[in-house]
Image: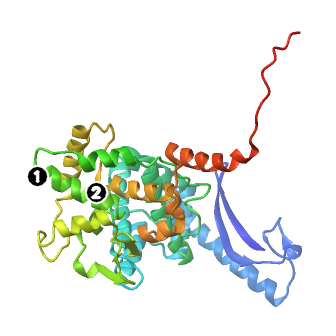
Amino acid sequence: SSVMMRIHLNGERVALGTTGVSVDPEMWDSTLGKVRGRTKEALATNAQLTSISTDLQVIFQRLEFSEELSLERIKSEYLGKREAMETVLSLFTKYNNDMYAQIGCGVSKANYRKFDICKRHFTNFLEIKYARTDLNAIELTPIVIHDFDVYLRTIVGQSFNTAIKTLKTFKTVIIFGRKAGVFNHDPFLNIHFKTKRVDRGFLTDEEIDTIMHKEFATQRLVNVRDIFLFSCFTGLAYVDVANLTADNIITMDGKQWIVTARKKTDTLSHILLLDIPKMIIKKYAGCAKNGRLIPILSNQRMNSYLKEIADVCGINKNLTFHMARHTFATMMLTKGVPVESVSKMLGHSSITTTQLYARITNKKIENDMLAVSKKLDKFNFVSSPAVKVTK
C-alpha cells in the first residue's frame, strides 16, 4: 500500500497525496509514521519518509514568520519542488505543438484548431477571472474548472453543449499531463460531462418542395437556393461544398459518386450523386473560380440570404446552410436508409454522431403505421352491433 501524506497547521489539515513509498500494512506503525523493524528494507523506507518530512520542515521554517504561510502554500512549494512543477499553459503549448507536428499524420487541422481555440479561451479566462498569465499545475483545482465552465457560458457565450465540448478538450490535455507526471491530483475529480440532447433543425419534404419550386425575384436568391438544395441532397457541410472540385467526382460501376475528405474530421464521405445535385453541377459548370465545382458565397452571406428565402417561402424556421446537412440526414433515415450507410455518406467518425439525427418524425410514424396496418388487416375483425348495457 502507498503511504499518503497530510500536513496540519492551526487546527486545519490538507492532503498532499501519495509519497510514492509503498509498505506492507502489517509492518506499518501508524503512531510513529514509519515501518517497524530493523531490516534493510525497513531502514531504506524510513529514510525516504524522513527525507520527505525534512523537506516539509524546511519549507515550513522558511515561511513560518511570513504572511504567505498557509497549508496551500506549503503544499504548493513542496509539490513544486518534488515534481519540478510545470504550468498549465506550458503543458498546453507542448501538447498543441505535438499535435501541430502530426497534422497530416493522423491529426487533422480542424482537430488541432479545436485545441488551439481551447487554449486561447483558457488564457483569456485566467486574465479576466484571476488576473493571471498562467497557473502552476498544483493550482488547477475543480473550482478552477467550474469557474472556466461559467466563463465559457457567460463571457464567451457558448451553449451548454459547446461548453461541455470545450471542457472535454481541456480534460484531454490534463489527462496527458497526469500521465506525464505533471499533476499529482485530478483537477476534474467528481466533474462529469453529459451533453443535452438537442433537436437539430431540419426541413420537411413539403418545405423542400416549396423552396425548390418558388419563383425568386433576384438571381442572387436563385443561386443561394440551388446551392442549399445541393447540400440537402448530398449532406455536405458548407466548407466541403466550397472545396469540391471535379477530382471529387468518381465513377464506379457506371454511377457517379462524390468522394471527399471532410474538412472537420478528415474522414472520407462517399455520396452517390442523385439527379438533383447532378443538375446543379451541370448548371453551374465553369462558373466557379480556382477549379471549384460550385460557386458559393461566404457562409455568413449564404445564411443571411437563406433567412430571406425562408421569409419569402413562409417557412418559420431559422434557416441556415448547415440545416441542409441535418435535412439530408433526416430525409435518408426516415426513408429507410440504414444508419450505417448515412454515417458513411456524412463522413462521421463515429456512428454515435449519426444517431443524433435519428429523430422520429410524424411522417415516419405515419408511414410505419400504414405499413403495419396492411399486415394487421388479415385479422378481419367484425364487431357485433353495440348493445347498451344497463346497471
User: Farthest top residue?
Assistant: 391
Quadrant in the rendering for residue 183: bottom right
Mark 1 residue element: helix
Q: Nearer the viewer, residue 22 or 199?
A: 199
Please rate how many residues cluster around mark 1, counting C-alpha atoms within 10 Å: few if below 14, some from 14 to 19, many from 20. few
Question: Which circle's residue, 1 or 2, is located before the other in the chain?
Answer: 1
What colour scheme was applied to this rendering of the protein? rainbow
Which residue: 16% across, 50% down?
221
Q: Nearer the viewer, residue 362 or 64?
A: 362
List the residue tagged with mark 1: 219
Which residue: 42% across, 69% down?
345
Quadrant location, the C terminus? top right
Mark 2 residue element: helix
With 212 as the anchor, is 217 left or right in this view? left
List the residue tagged with mark 2: 229
Against 199, residue 290 (above or below) is below
